[in-house]
Image (cartoon, helix red, strand yellow):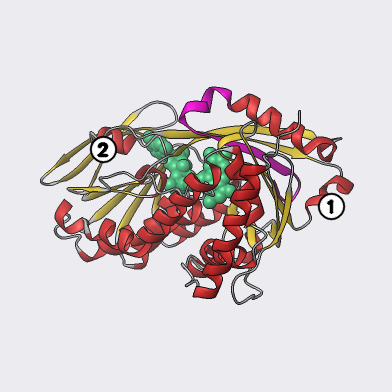
Amino acid sequence: MAQRVLIIGASVGGATAASTLRAAGIETILLERELVKPKPCGGAVPPAAFREFNIPQSLIDCKVKNCLIVSPSNQQTHVPVAGTVPTADDYVAMVRREVFDHWLRDRAVAQGAELIHGTLADLTITDHGVDATYRDPQGTPHCLHADVIIGADGAYSTTAKLLGLPPTQRAVAIQERIMLPPDKMARWADTADLYLGHRVSPDFYGWAFPKLDHIAVGIGAGPGHTQAARQLLTNMKARLGDALDGGVLKLREAHALPMEPRKQMVLDRAMLIGDAAGLVVHTSGEGIYWAMKSGQMAAEVLATCLDAPTARNLRAYPQRWWRTYGTMYKFLSWLEWWGYGNERQMEVFTEMCRNRDVQRLTFDSYMHKQMAPAPWLSQLRMTGDILVSEARNYLFPRRAPAL
Ligand SMILES: Cc1cc2nc3c(=O)[nH]c(=O)nc-3n(C[C@H](O)[C@H](O)[C@H](O)COP(=O)(O)OP(=O)(O)OC[C@H]3O[C@@H](n4cnc5c(N)ncnc54)[C@H](O)[C@@H]3O)c2cc1C
């Protein structure tokens, strides 16, 4: 009998894993509990995702070519979105998840994956395979048997819970979709805003991202600040001031973000990818590309050992992951700690974004997922600018104005 893989969650990570498995001719089931409502998300996607996963540009609402970074004291830095060697492929794509996710899911189904509408409720792993119970939308339980399960079910992963893995720390991100009159939308024609400061986001940043017919305004709040998320979003809108005048609220949405990668990403006959594995980059809160990439990588490893899917064999997936991206994750975690640690550092961070070398390194790693080498002269310039900025903000601290 053909071997089957059961994937829980048919969002970006699950759909990409399914496409990769189908391309290898492996029977694949996608179990998804929500087929209509979009995943709450800012929808910023790097061009690398479109290139590497063969996704049509027609899914992009707009291509952001400029980034406005605003410090707690309202210092502004305008950053052109361009890498070390500027190309037409330098942009941040803005997508709506209801469009993006559906396309990925439909592609997986067209490639032969079976999509089932239901919620995973129970799971048993034996020497012979995986026995899963799911409830359909009417609440009726059904059983499924597979050889391996992939948990692509997000930050609250039921799969991880049923596998007996401990919960991980989570942040919360909340956003509103606001429809604006055309003259107000023009302000964001090709620009995305990032706002820093404890009153909008003590741990991350607030954002205003342009979409086809609205602006998505949101904030992220770390574990100690989740209760204040609504107030932080109100503060974020206050900082945008009259830019939102005449706006009509279309949707308010919120969801959790994992705060750390899971130590255990594989068990016998089981793998975790994307948010379920905790693979979000914290400086940017970026998880779409990483969910897709981990889905692809996990599926590629699984295709080589489907006859013996032991934890030992599946471990090639986390090993390959951390070999490829470990340095970048460590650097970006350090950057979050350094740049968002307190409001003085947020001022320094905003000033540092004026440095051309910093801009290029940041966008190379975001857009193309490469840690571009920094020549010694660039390093020297960056270090000099950091020291001057640190000293200036220490000696002459800036104050956040009243909201
Ligand atoms: C407000 C907000 C803004 C964000 N902005 C950005 C951004 O701009 N750019 C970016 O890159 N990332 C962003 N992220 C992060 C990004 O949304 C996630 O990292 C990404 O969606 C993870 O993809 P995934 O496939 O791992 O999981 P998810 O997209 O969370 O999908 C999990 C899927 O599993 C399904 N599921 C869950 N439980 C079950 C179950 N028991 N049975 C069946 N199905 C189940 C869910 O319905 C869902 O479809 C944001 C997150 C939030 C909350």
Front residue of 371/88: it is 371
Q: Which residue is drawn at 66% across and 53% down?
A: 351
Residue of label 2: 132
* Percent coordinates x, y for residue 65 in the rendering: 70, 62
Mark 2 or 1, which is nearer the eye? 1
45 relative to 154 in the view: left or right: right
Residue closest to the eye, 371 or 40: 371
Label 1 packing within 10 angstroms: few (<14), some (14-19), many (20+):
few
Say whether residue 36 is visible: no
**Residue where numbered disc 1 is placed:** 186
Name which quarter of the figure residue 262 lies in. Answer: top left
Magenta stretch holds residue 227? yes
Work out whether residue 144 or residue 379 is closer to the camera in this orientation and state it. 379
Residue depicted at x 12% and y 47%: 128
Q: In this view, does 167 lie to the left or right of 356?
A: left
Label 2 CB less than 8 angstroms from ligand 1? no
Query: Which residues are drawn in magenta?
Result: 209-228
Label 2 Cα crowd, 10 Å radius (few <14 / some 14-19 / many 20+): some
The kind of secondary structure element at disc 1 is helix
How far is mark 2 from mark 1, CA to CA?
A: 50 Å
Residue 268, x across and y down, in percent? 17, 48
Of all residues, the one furthest to the top in this rendering is 227
Does 60 appear above or below 200? below
**49 vs 243: above or below:** below
Amino acid carrying mark 2 in the image = Ala
